[in-house]
């Protein structure tokens, strides 16, 4: 019954057996301000093309699942108001009721798998929030990584999260966490967190081989590829620490809960860094898109 609408570009790539990279849309609607969000979305798509793969930005528009958006659709989504932020729990409801929603990491993984796309690039994944021992705020992205066989390239976890607890939950769920080019698990705006990733692979082909090996072994779930922000774009962790603490206190004061928490914190940090967090965010997403394209190419070569 579910009949995803493929963009012309995605359809052509499919027919020619070209590598595809999925992209989420929550980063557009809830992660960045307009009009930079649309500019970045376009730029990231172009980065994937330049690296030899085809981008597939995923969203739900008026009850239809779109795999790949054309220029007008991307424009409209980037300035639409009241777009839902869809995760595993509300993805089906949005489709079934004709709604419009942007997909988070979790929902994008579900859609990518449905469309036969193995690799997905984003900025950062959701994780275990600071204070989760009291709030129980743990992103559904982690469960999704445990269940859905998509390789997700992200710049680690945002420093608004509890990184050590996030890594512990990923370990419990059996999700491979693979750092690229360094041992340390990256911390989104900063290249390094104080914690090492359990695995390190500097070569996209090794990551592609591991993806295939997990499939051969019938191990459910995906992999998290933790690709650090380029050194020239990072914001030192010490500089961000007080800003994050203040943003969190603000969120608590205004009783922000549930799915509103992450967008609220991102917006506060954007204001408090006078836009520098956004510049870093753009650099890391583009870096992840390029690396994801290389993994997708390796996967394509392996399955030929
Ligand atoms: N990273 C960003 N910007 C974002 C997100 C991540 O730089 O907007 C989004 C992703 O879509 C991710 C979601 O899946 O936040 C996690 O939300 P939550 O913590 O409510 O699960
Ligand atoms: Mn949450």
Image (cartoon, rainbow, N blue to C red):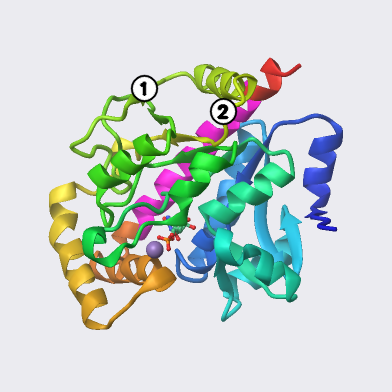
Instruction: Report the front residue among 200 and 53.
Output: 200
Disc 2: CA contacts within 10 A as few (<14), some (14-19) or many (>=20): some
The residue singled out by tag 2 in the image is 219
Q: Position of residue 102 (x, y in %)?
A: 59, 65
* Helix, strand or loop at mark 1: strand
Per the picture, the main secondary structure of the magenta-coloured stretch is helix
Q: Position of residue 10 (x, y in %)?
A: 78, 45
Residues drawn in magenta: 278-298
The residue singled out by tag 1 in the image is 200
Mark 1 or mark 2, which has the lower sequence index?
A: 1
Residue under the point 58% across and 18% down: 213
Eyeballing the image, is 200 above or below 250?
above
Disc 1: CA contacts within 10 A as few (<14), some (14-19) or many (>=20): many
Q: Position of residue 291 (x, y in %)?
A: 51, 32
Residue under the point 23% across and 69% down: 272
Q: Is residue 121 visible?
A: yes
Residue under the point 76% across and 31% down: 18
Instruction: Report the front residue among 282 and 122.
Output: 122
Find residue 141 and name its label.
Answer: none
């Amino acid at each position: 019954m579910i009949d995803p609408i493929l963009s012309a570009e995605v359809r052509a790539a499919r027919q020619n057996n070209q590598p595809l990279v999925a992209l989420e849309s929550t980063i557009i609607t809830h992660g960045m301000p307009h009009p930079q969000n649309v500019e970045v979305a376009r730029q990231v798509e172009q980065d994937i093309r330049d690296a030899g793969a085809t981008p597939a930005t995923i969203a739900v528009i008026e009850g239809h699942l779109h795999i790949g958006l054309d220029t007008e659709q991307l424009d409209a989504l980037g300035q639409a108001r009241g777009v839902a932020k869809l995760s595993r729990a509300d993805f089906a409801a949005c489709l079934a009721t004709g709604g419009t929603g942007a997909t988070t990491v979790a929902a994008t993984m579900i859609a990518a798998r449905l469309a036969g796309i193995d690799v997905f690039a984003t900025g950062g994944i959701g994780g275990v929030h600071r204070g989760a021992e009291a709030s129980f705020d743990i992103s559904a992205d982690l469960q999704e990584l445990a269940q859905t066989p998509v390789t997700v390239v992200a710049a680690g976890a945002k420093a608004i999260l509890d990184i050590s607890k996030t890594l512990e939950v990923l370990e419990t769920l059996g999700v491979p966490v693979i750092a690229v080019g360094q041992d340390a698990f990256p911390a989104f705006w900063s290249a390094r967190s104080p914690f090492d990733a359990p695995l390190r692979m500097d070569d996209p082909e090794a990551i592609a081989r591991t993806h295939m090996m997990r499939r051969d072994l019938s191990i459910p779930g995906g992999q998290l590829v933790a690709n650090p922000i380029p050194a020239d774009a990072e914001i030192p962790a010490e500089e961000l620490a007080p800003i994050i603490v203040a943003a969190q206190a603000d969120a608590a004061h205004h009783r922000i809960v549930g799915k509103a928490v992450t967008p609220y914190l991102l917006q506060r940090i954007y204001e408090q860094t006078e836009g520098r967090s956004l510049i870093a965010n753009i650099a890391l997403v583009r870096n992840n898109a390029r690396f994801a394209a290389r993994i997708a190419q390796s996967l394509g070569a392996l399955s030929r």
